[in-house]
Amino acid sequence: MRESQHKKLTRSASDRILAGVFGGFGQYFNCSPNIFRVAYVILSILSGIVPGIIIYIIMMVIIPPDPTHPGILGFFRAINDMQQGSNLTSADSRSRRTLTDVEEKDIKRNGRS
């Protein structure tokens, strides 16, 4: 009983068909995710297809991905972080330049100083 209190419901990265929602349920309840998939398809058909799709999308958004395998979104975040890191260093070097050995001279234009 204590073991289930420390478990966290996440979307599965290894046992997934669409988003890994039912794979996560299978891992959380320690049973086959195919049972959840078949039950969900039957309930979706009986209640109409649209509510089933909406409920699945809500579960996909609410249930977090597996932190050990972040999936494609984690890959895109890593690429974005790498690009932002390289852009910051290159932007800093381009935006501010240090001038050395500069002399000031007065320039007279059209008789004005």
Image (cartoon, grey):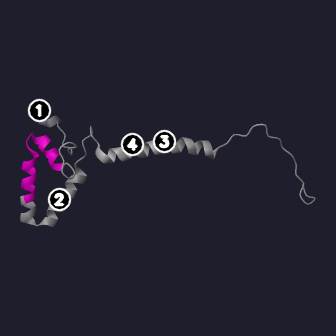
Indicate which disc, 3 or 4, sits on the residue closer to the N terminus.
4
User: Who comes first in sequence, dot 1 or dot 3?
Assistant: 1
First-in-chain label (4 vs 2): 2
Q: CA distance from mark 3 to mark 4?
A: 11 Å
Neighbour tally class for label 3: few under 14, some 14-19, many 20 plus, Cα within 10 Å = few
Q: Are marks 2 and 3 in contact (CB under 8 Å)?
A: no
Q: Residue at x 8, y 64 (%)?
A: 45
How far from the left and from the top, in percent, is residue 62?
Answer: 23, 51
Residues under labels 1 and 3: Cα distance? 43 Å
Residue depth check, mark 1 versus mark 3: number of the one nearer the observer: 3
Q: How many marks?
A: 4
Residue 35 is left or right of residue 70, and the answer is left
Labelled pair 1, 2 in contact (Cβ < 8 Å): no
| Whether label 1 touches label 3, CB < 8 Å | no
User: Mark 4 and mark 2: span between their CA atoms?
Assistant: 30 Å
Find residue 55 and name its label: 2
In this orientation, which residue lies closer to the viewer: 6 or 22? Answer: 22
Residue 10 image offset from top left, x and y in percent? 21, 44
Q: Amino acid at mark 2?
A: Ile
Q: Determine the secondary structure under disc 3.
A: helix
- Relative placement, left or right, of 88 versus 61 is right
Query: Is label 4 in a helix, a strand or a loop?
Result: helix
| Type of amino acid under label 4 | Ala
Residue 49 position in % (x across, y down): 13, 65
- For mark 2, does the 10 Å Cα neighbourhood hold few (<14), some (14 to 19), or many (20 or more) residues? few
Residue 2, disc = 1
Residue type, label 1? Arg
Give the secondary structure at mark 1. Answer: helix
Disc 3: which residue = 85
Start-end of magenta stretch: 21-41
